[in-house]
Image (tube, rainbow, N blue to C red):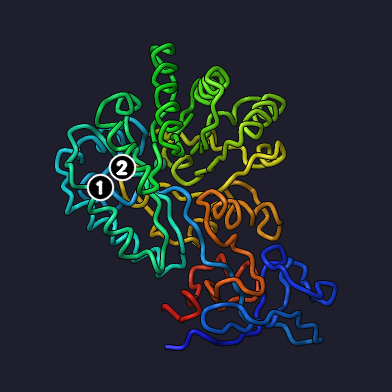
Amino acid sequence: MSNSGKLEVLIPRSLCEIENAEDLKIDNESFASVFVAWEKGFVSELKPINIENKKPKKILFPRFVETHSHIDKSFTAGEFPNCKSNYEEALSLNLEEHKTRSTRKVIERAEKSLILALKNGYRAIRSHVDTYETQNNNIWDELFKLQKKYSSKLKLQYVALAPLEFWDTHHGEKLAKTFSKENGILGGVLVPPFRNKAKIKNLISKMLLLADKYKLEIDLHIDESTVKPGAGIKVLLETIDRLNIKVPITCSHLSNILSLNDHEILNLGSKIAENDIKVIALPLTNFWLLNHKDKSTSLNRPVAPIKQLQKSLVDVSIGSDNVQDPWYPFGNYDPFYLISLSMPLLQLNPWERLTLSSILLSPSRLLNLNWDGLLKKGCPFDFVLLDAEKWADIFSSNLKREVFVNGELYI
Ligand SMILES: [Zn+2]
């Protein structure tokens, strides 16, 4: 199959680095008309099209990056349905699922997730994997094999999502050592209310020191709650301050800080930015699960305050989180499902640079990918081509797409 080609397309202006930019024709939704050619999988030519009445009828996006998923438990909603749709029930069903969990089941779910993600237009995924002491020992060997199997088309990054106590055991130390060779990330949950704050601080310290010892990153489910706004992030910041160490940290969720006032959010945002902590907003699971009530409708659904955090110069990404499991019963590893819902939920304008940055550029930075996702000469032709001429076409139900991987039409 050919890995060369050429196209006339529209692309969001902020996703394109081009010579002669002053000649670009940009429409009122910030789409620029460009001619792009690629050879042997890489962009060889890129120039503005500026001809009256000749607007391309296709839109180009770089393949997407999923910053937060759970491929080990996807598609378990049928067997473990969460009919109450709340956090407590989700957790209890998740623990039930662990009892029947086997390496084979996890790999099957994970592979199904990757196949869908590739077909729908993802090029990289960070996935949390439930991790506990009684777990089957060979699970990580099989997960690393799966990672290698897909590595030419999709970069897969693992976070071991464990109770904080796990990182203070010899199992935790052993896994951290393995991860230092396999580029894994240490994960955990830091969700208030905390019954014993001193104990939590001690466990966080140990986890940070372990990450520092093996030069690893940390990704925490933090403040995914409706109570004690910011209690988790404050504990984390205090601990980092006291230890005075520099470990790369991602805060996933950070939802309940939304109920602080704007001044407090901006203050907290500055501290988060100062410590180079990255944030992932996860609107779908948050809007579905938090404050879900049986008999009344509430609009009180905490989610990371993305605009205030960006204003404080925090690098914020948007992720999907769960797919068809007890935590969130819908979704299909489709980036367009995620953005179609996130824009109205978070009141983000798709034609704005910061919005597109949170969907495409921040995620590429978060996963430390070789390519930032901008269309430019020399970049890989790893793109999704849509039958669309405007944002309304993208957010419609019958979107037609073609996915190019290394310059070749994948599907
Ligand atoms: Zn999650």
Q: Identify residue for label 1.
A: 140
Disc 1 is placed on an element classified as: helix
Identity of the residue drawn at 32% across and 61% down:
148
Q: Tell me if mark 1 has few (under 14), some (14-19) or many (20+) residues whose alpha carbon lies within 10 angstroms of its own.
A: some
Mark 2 residue CB less than 8 A from any atom of ligand 1: no
Which residue is label 2 attached to?
Answer: 178
Residue 409 placed where, x, y %?
45, 81
Viewer-closest of 197 and 202: 202
Dot 2 alpha-carbon crowd within 10 angstroms: few under 14, some 14 to 19, many 20 or more: some
Residue 262 seen in render: yes
Q: Amino acid at mark 1?
A: Trp
Q: Position of residue 153 (x, y in %)?
A: 41, 68
Q: Quadrant of the N terminus?
A: bottom left
Please tell me whether mark 2 or mark 1 is closer to you in this view. Answer: 2
The amino acid pointed to by label 2 is Thr
Where does residue 275 sit, x and y in percent of width and height? 61, 31
- Using residue 120 as the reference point, say whether residue 163 is left or right of it: left
Please give left or right for residue 128 compared with residue 283 in the image: left
